[in-house]
Image: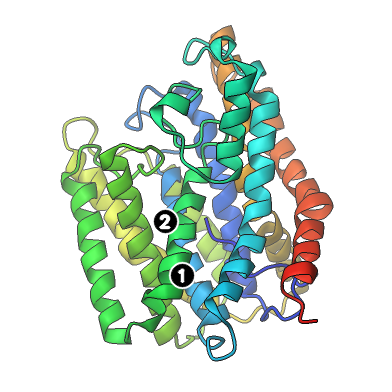
Amino acid sequence: MDRTIASSSAFADTKPHYNILDGLRGVAAITVVCFHLFEAYATSHVDQKINHGYLAVDFFFILSGFVMGYAYDDRWKTMTIKEFIKRRVIRLHPMVVIGAIIGAVMFYWQGCSAWDVSKVSIAMLLVSTLLNMLLIPATPGFEIRGVGEMYPLNGPSWSLFFEYIGNVLYAFWIRKLPTKALAVLVLLAGGGLAAFAIWGPYGDICAGFSLTGENMLAGSLRLLFSFSAGLLLARVFRPVRIKGAFWIGSIAIVVLSAIPRIGGHEHFWMNGLYDTICFAVIFPLLVYLGASEKVTDKTTIRICKFLGDISYPLYMVHYPFIYLYFAWVKNKNLSFMESLPGAAALVIGSILLAYLCLKLYDEPVRRYLTNRLLKKK
């Protein structure tokens, strides 16, 4: 998930925001929370409600590439790779750490039939916490939840693992590619990801969160296509006249995420084709439109700023509560309507917690690290 442009309170030299893109990122983050809620009632991705919420990650990667090109492409004559890496670690890693800590604190309250937390020793939990904080994927021997996640304390950290890979590739290689070569990379990666979606084992691209070969392949293709497509879009971007881009984009993201599974168990290729249309056509178009409009309406600016500010913290703190909600639903054998108050509390509470983490932890820590590591003496 991308968080490229930092708050102005943390980085004085940050370029102006694309307000609408900030807002769309926040809308997508909320759809991720809702998508994860319905994991408690699904037997697979085929029958899950808010079925295509996983595509938000691909939208985040495109945003990441686009904003990366905007924020950094013209800085390389004065910025070193070391300084760039410092900036990215400062921007991304504080929330990785707090997400792991929240997951560890809540771990022993998440027991259910799907995973037996009582068998996990405190020593193993501490090791797993350290691995997650350092963004080191958990191998099977250290995957303490037992469901195959790279980061069993805070599942969404997997996309940060690939985000870091994207940042390194950008710094050492992709940024140096001529535009035509970058376009070829986008086409090749997009073809590979489309093939995985349409003819792959799942009929979707909801993969990347595990150390299995299929997941690593899918996660790598998702990053390589979307991140590179965002960079390419930044290079060739020419704004068009558009009004209401935030509202158009928000409705599109919500609708695309909520569309039921297409083709069922019989025709996986149909859903794979839907995923391909979303990541290859619609999402780049939404980023293009969102970057085109210059917002002057103060209400829309406030909404977009709030959604943009909470988007990354929300993405990184909500999932430990999803584990808890999942366990509660399974242990009590609850229907969705019976658990609706808990679901609403989870969504609202996660947004509030994200805002508190932003103001009380993330921004102060980033400001401190920026002053210590980046300010010239």
Residue 226 higher or lower than 354, as above or below: below
305 vs 34: above or below: below
Q: Is residue 318 left or right of residue 199?
A: right
Residue type, label 2: Asp
Is residue 292 visible in the rendered structure shown here?
no
Q: Position of residue 66 (x, y in %)?
A: 48, 73
- Residue occupying image coordinates x 47% and y 85%: 240
Image coords of residue 58 (percent x, y): 41, 56
What amino acid is found at the position of numbered circle 1 in the picture?
A: Gly
Q: How is the image coloured?
A: rainbow
| Residue 262 badge | none
Q: Residues within 10 Å of mark 1 (few under 14, many from 20)?
A: many
Quarter containing the C terminus:
bottom right
> Label 2 to label 1, Cα distance in Å?
11 Å
> Which quadrant holds residue 85?
bottom right
Helix, strand or loop at disc 1?
helix
- Looking at the rendered structure, which numbered label has been put on residue 58? 2
Front residue of this view, candidates 168 and 155: 168
Quarter residue 340 falls in: top right
Q: Is residue 218 above or below residue 290?
A: above
The answer to which of marks 2 and 1 sits earlier in the sequence is: 2
Residue 78: x %, y % from top left? 59, 89
* Closest to the observer, 179 or 370: 370
**Which numbered tag is attached to residue 65?**
1
Query: Horizontal and vertical percent for residue 52?
Result: 40, 44
Q: Nearer the viewer, mark 2 or mark 1?
A: 1
Residue 304 placement, left or right of 161: right
